[in-house]
Image: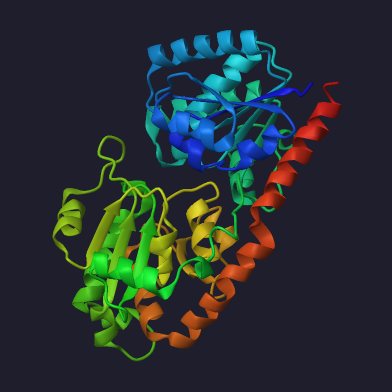
């Protein structure tokens, strides 16, 4: 009889995307149950992964009364289901899941850290979030930061001790399916069709961003930089000879949902997105690969990340990336090898990097030629899944 493994995220989209395929893989070794806030997405996960799912409502915001209710519901669930392992992802699922699992005496309690939103918080809010983070870690058997940089931050902040931390494989929560994310999956006809739909010419240079359209993803700076790029302002910020034609043939494609409740964009940014015909916002897309297939370079100027899947996906699709110098991003990208690393929150640095992509063809083509192979070598999905399974098995030996 297989041991029971419960994997938990705050919302079902995270269960669907952050660890896609891993649930089905683990189901061959454990009886896997997926838990998150309910809805159609959760039901889709059940079918796609071939697992049982159970809805438990959890809020992404700080909502003490709702959170206590969620802890109680998960505690009751654990007492009924009797899992051997509970493994949580995302901050709110982490604190709720680890508390409930500790109270319910679940033998192995694991939490993956894929980012620390608290790093952008200040004052009293930061103190509260620090306390919550420490409590999450204290309730867990093991903490899995999904990047080496994140592990160092956790130690620097004194959230827990080193012996409780483990980075699986080379980082990443789920790795990348490099057969699925492969530019060869898309024909010239398919790409031409999407370009026509989006009013993109074949000789246009397409910058792409994939993710939530919020402030801490660097969207305000990205949009402002692209506006300047098209306007040919600040030519002194780029190296080499200036090409007005190439900047005028550039497009910016934004793939992801616009979130207005948490961390909204500036009104000026929203106005530019709506009114600049060279910025194409396509909203959330179930399949982002076609958009990568018609693009030339990912621009991902996030303020904070754990280990960003988007940068892995872009690389697997053969795109070099412009990323900020933050943990995760600066582990996937090697500066001037498969992309470029720039300072955080610097509009002019984004502008300079984008402009150099347009005019320094040798450097751009070198990064492009390296992009896919580096991802294949380091982050192939089944390697990450296998390493996670090995980590589970090692913990099982301490809980016979």
Residue 62 is left or right of residue 167, and the answer is left
Judge by depth and name the residue closer to the eye, 341 or 193. 193
Q: How many marks?
A: 0
Quadrant (top left, top right, bottom left, bottom right) of the N terminus: top right
Please determine whether, in this image, residue 349 is positioned above or below residue 324: below
Residue 299 appears in the picture as rendered:
no
Residue plotted at (52% across, 33% down): 47
| Quadrant in the rendering for residue 94 | top right
Q: Position of residue 283 (x, y in %)?
A: 29, 50
Which of the pair 112/159 is nearer the observer?
112
Residue 249 is situated, as x and y percent measured from the top left of the image, at: 26, 79
Q: Split into 4 quadrants, where in the image is the C terminus?
A: top right
Q: Image height check: is 226 above or below 216?
A: below
Query: In this image, 331 relative to 61: left or right?
Result: right
Q: Residue at x 29, y 88 (%)?
A: 243
Query: Is any part of residue 197 visible from this angle?
Result: yes
Q: Give the residue drawn at x 51%, y 58%.
A: 313
Colour basis: rainbow
Q: Nearer the viewer, residue 374 or 282?
A: 282
Q: Residue at x 44, y 24 (%)?
A: 37
Up/down of 318 relative to 132, above or below: below
**Residue farthest front in this picture:** 189
Judging depth in this view, the residue of 88 and 220 nearest the camera is: 88
In the image, taking residue 170 as reference, residue 196 lies left or right, namely left
Residue 150: image location, x then y, percent: 59, 46
């Amino acid at each position: 009889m297989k041991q029971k493994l419960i994997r938990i995220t705050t919302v079902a989209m995270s269960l669907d995307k952050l660890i896609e395929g891993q649930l089905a893989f683990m189901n061959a070794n454990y009886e896997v149950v997926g838990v998150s806030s309910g809805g159609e997405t959760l039901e889709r996960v059940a079918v796609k992964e071939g697992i049982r799912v159970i809805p438990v409502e959890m809020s992404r915001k700080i909502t003490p009364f709702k959170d206590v209710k969620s802890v109680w519901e998960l505690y009751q669930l654990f007492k009924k289901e009797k899992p051997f392992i509970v493994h949580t992802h995302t901050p709110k699922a982490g604190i709720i899941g680890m508390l409930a699992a500790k109270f319910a005496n679940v033998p192995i309690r694991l939490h993956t850290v894929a980012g620390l939103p608290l790093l952008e918080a200040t004052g009293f809010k930061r103190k509260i979030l620090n306390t919550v983070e420490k409590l999450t870690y204290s309730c867990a058997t093991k903490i899995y930061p999904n990047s080496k940089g994140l592990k160092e931050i956790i130690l620097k902040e004194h959230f827990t001790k080193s012996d409780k931390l483990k980075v699986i494989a080379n980082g990443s929560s789920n790795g990348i399916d490099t057969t699925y994310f492969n530019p060869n999956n898309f024909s010239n006809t398919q790409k031409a069709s999407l370009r026509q739909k989006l009013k993109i010419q074949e000789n246009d240079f397409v910058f792409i961003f994939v993710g939530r359209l919020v402030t801490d993803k660097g969207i305000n700076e990205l949009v402002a930089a692209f506006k300047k790029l098209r306007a040919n302002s600040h030519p002194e910020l780029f190296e080499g000879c200036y090409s007005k034609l190439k900047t005028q043939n550039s497009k910016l494609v934004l793939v992801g949902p616009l979130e207005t409740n948490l961390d909204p964009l500036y009104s000026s940014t929203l106005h530019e997105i709506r009114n600049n015909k060279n910025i194409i916002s396509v909203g959330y897309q179930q399949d982002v690969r076609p958009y990568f297939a018609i693009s030339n370079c990912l621009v991902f100027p996030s303020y904070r990340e754990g280990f960003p899947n988007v940068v892995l996906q872009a690389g697997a699709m053969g795109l070099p990336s412009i990323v900020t110098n933050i943990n995760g991003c600066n582990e996937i990208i090697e500066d001037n090898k498969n992309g470029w690393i720039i300072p955080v929150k610097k509009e002019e640095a984004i502008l300079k990097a984008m402009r150099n992509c347009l005019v320094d063809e040798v450097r751009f083509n070198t990064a492009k030629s390296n992009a896919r192979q580096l991802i294949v070598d380091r982050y192939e999905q089944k390697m990450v899944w296998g390493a996670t399974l090995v980590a589970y098995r090692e913990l099982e030996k301490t809980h016979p």
